[in-house]
Image (cartoon, grey):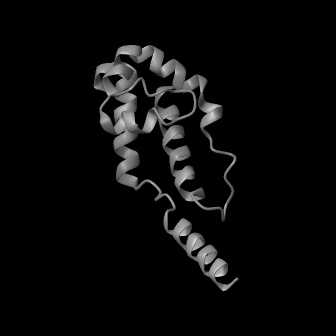
Amino acid sequence: MALTAISTTSLLNKELKMSLTPLTERQKSLIVSNIVKACRSIDNLNKTGYNFIYLCSGFIAHYDLYGFIASYTGESLKRDILSYAGQNQWRNFHEGERDYEYYMSKKDVYNRILAQIV
């Protein structure tokens, strides 16, 4: 019985340590800048912007950055960002929950992108 309690506690502690780190202000700025540029010309999309956008709801990876670029134009990227805005607010996370701050940092980035492309 004691072994189970120790194992459970150990697993819980390990899970808490695996929380996602919120994006820094610098990361946010780099992502926003790149996605906004990519909305003008998809060829501007770089790894930083790609790593953010393909993980947003509604977008798929297209295997890699170059597959993503081949599937979009700047206008179609802009259209999809606007179209999927409601799905990318991460409302299913609540203050105090694990990874809440991370998902709110993603929400902040998405909304900053929206503000600049509308």
Q: Percent position (x, y) of residue 75?
A: 44, 15
Q: Percent position (x, y) of residue 48?
A: 33, 39
Give the image quarter of residue 74. top left
- Check the picture and name the quadrant holding the N terminus: bottom right
In the picture, measured across the screen, residue 10 lies left or right of residue 53, that is: right
Please state which of residues 68 and 43 is positioned toward the viewer in this rendering: 68
Q: Is residue 46 above or below residue 98?
A: above
Please state which of residues 112 and 110 is positioned toward the viewer in this rendering: 110
Picture residue at 66% right of the left edge, 85% below the top: 2
Give the image quarter of residue 99. bottom right
Query: Going by the picture, which residue comes out furthest to the bottom?
Result: 2
How many discs mark residues in the rendered view? 0
Please state which of residues 87 and 7 is positioned toward the viewer in this rendering: 7
Q: Percent position (x, y) of residue 46?
A: 29, 32
Picture residue at 43% right of the left edge, 39% below the top: 52
Please state which of residues 49 and 39 is positioned toward the viewer in this rendering: 49
Q: Percent position (x, y) of residue 32?
A: 40, 38
Picture residue at 49% right of the left edge, 63% below the top: 18
